[in-house]
Amino acid sequence: MITWQSQELIRLVNEKYPDWDGFQHPHFVKDEIDYKRKAVKQTRELIGRKLYKEQLAAGNYDEIISRLEKACRQTNLMYIAQPRNGDLAILYADGLNKWEFCQQVYALLYDDRPTPDKIDSFAEYCLNNQLPIRWPFASYLLFITKPSAEVFVKPRVAKWFMQFMGFGEKYTSELSADMYEQFKKSWHGLKAELGGFGDLPAKDMIDIQSLLWVAYEVSQKRVEGLDTKGQIELDRPAKLREPEPSYQLRYEPPETPDDVAQPAENKLYSLEDCAADTGFDLNQLERWRDQIERRKQGLFYGPPGTGKTFLARHLAKHLASSTGGLVETVQFHPAYDYADFVEGVRPQLDEAGKMTWVNRPGVFMRFCRQAKVNKGICVFIIDEMNRGNLARIFGELMMLIEYRNETLTLPSGERFMVPENVRIIGTMNTADRSIALIDHALRRRFAAISLGPDFGLIERYHAKHNTEFNPAKLITLLGQLNADIADPAYALGVSYFLTPSLKTDLQNIWQTEVEPYLEEYFFNQPEMLKKYRWDSLGL
C-alpha cells in the first residue's frame, strides 16, 4: 500500500516530469540516474577496496587523498565552490595527519563492522583531531561505493524528508550513528513501499536519492523559500494541513501622480564626462551605450575588480541626465524575492491594532510608476544580479521587459507594464556564478557585455592623478598572474590598484585583499601561491 506521503512525493516528481511512471522514465534516468551510476563505476576505479589497500601499503597518502577528491567531484551532490569551507573541507585541513586520515577513511568504507559503528568511529576521530566534520563527506563516500545499501545525507534535503514523513523531531544535524541509521531505515522503507509502483521498481539508493532530490527541488520552487515547516505544510494534502489564521487582506492602491517623488533637476553629464571619470575609451563607451539602448537592458559581467558597478552607475548617470530622468540601484541577494521586486503581501496593524495583510508594490513597480510620470530616460541598476533567484524575482517581467508598453495582470489583479523609457543595467561577478547558469529566457533579453581586466585603466589613472607611481612592473605582473589563473571568470581585476596612495599602500592592498583571493583560488597549488606572495614579487 502506498501511503499519502509517497503519493505526494510522486505528485511532486510529476510536476517536473508529467508522464513520470517509474524509475526507468527516460528523461528522469538521463537527468538524475545515468551520471550517478557512471560515478559509481569511476569511484570504484579510483578507490575500490583492493586499489585503496594497495595505495595504503605503498604509503601513497597524497595519491589516496587526490583520488578521494576526484571521487567526490564526480557528481554535483557535494558543495565544492569554496573548497576550504565546503563539503570537502576535511581534505584541506591544516595539520592533517595523512596516514591516520587515510586509514580512517579506509575503515569507514571497508571495515566489516556495521555502518553505524563505523560512522561513530569516524565522527569521534574527527572531533578528537579538530577536523571539519559534515554529513555529506562521510555519507557520500559510503553512498557512492555501496549504493545498494548506503545513503547520501544532504542535511537540508534529509531534514525536509524526515519532517515530510512525519518524524522530523528525530532529526539532528550532528553526524551520528543513530541519525544515519534513521536515514537508512527511511530510504529503504520508501524503496520497499514504492516496490509496487511502475513496471520497474527502484534498484537501489541512487534511484531513491534521485526521487527525493527532484521532489525537494520542486517543493522549494513551489513554496518560494518558506522555512522547512512551511514547505511541509504546503506539501501535505489539504485535509491534513494546519488551519490558517484568519487575517484580513486588503490591497494598497497605486500612488497618485501627486504622491510620486519628482526628480531633481539634473546637470548634463556627457559621454565625454563619463570617459574622463571612468577611464574607459570613449568609442567603447559609445558601443556599450548603444547596446543598452538597443535592448533597453544590459548586463555587465566579469571577474571581481573590473569596475562593473562603477561603470554601470556612470553610464546610468549619462543616460538619465540629458532628459531629467531617474536612477535607482538595488542589490540582489539569496533572500530577495518577487514581493521585494514587483509586489507582495506584507503584514500591517490597522488603527484598531488588528493584524491585516496589505499588498504592497515592490521597488521595481514603484520605480516604473515614477518613470511613467517622469517621461525621461530612467535607469534601474541591479547590482550582483546573479546572486538572486532571477526566475522567481522577475516573474511576469520576463515578458514585460521585452514587450514594452504591453500589460499583464499580476496576482493582485493589477494591470502592470514596463514603460518604454525604463532602462535596466545589471552587473554580475563571474567568480560567484557563471553567466551560463542564468535562466536563458532572461539572459537573452539583456545585451550581455563582458568586462575583463583593462590594464590601461591603471596606467591612465595614475597619469591623470599624478600619483608618482609607475605601474609598468605591476601591469606585467598582473598579466602573468591572470595567465596562470587561466580562467577569465576568475581573473584579477584592476580596481584594487586605482587609488592615489598606491605607492605607499600597494603592500597592504596585496597582502590583505589580493592574497586572500589567491589563497582560495590556488588552494591546492602551494607553489603557485608561493610565487605570488608579496615577499616573492619584488615590487
Image (spheres, helix red, strand yellow):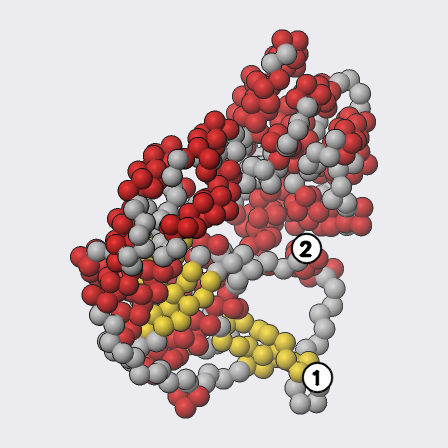
Q: Secondary structure at mark 1?
A: loop
Which mark is on residue 114? none
Of callouts 1 and 2, the N-terminal one? 2
Q: Residue at x 49, y 76 (%)?
A: 361
Q: Quadrant of residue 72?
A: top right
Instruction: Give the quarter of the figure containing the N terminus.
Output: top right
Q: Of the residues shown, which amino acid type is indicated by label 1? A: Lys
Q: Which residue is mark 1?
A: 354
Q: Dot 2 surroundings within 10 Å: few (below 14), some, or many (20 or more)?
A: some
Which mark is on residue 228? 2
Q: For this rendering, which residue is in front, 88 or 218?
A: 88
Q: Of the residues shown, which amino acid type is indicated by label 2? A: Thr
Alpha carbon separation for disc pair 1 and 2 = 28 Å
Q: How many marks?
A: 2
Up/down of 379 relative to 9, above or below: below
Please, which residue is most extreme toward the left here?
A: 283
Up/down of 184 relative to 469, above or below: above
Disc 1 vs disc 2: Cβ atoms closer than 8 Å?
A: no
Q: Residue 292, position in %: x, y?
A: 27, 61
Q: Residue at x 31, y 52 (%)?
A: 468
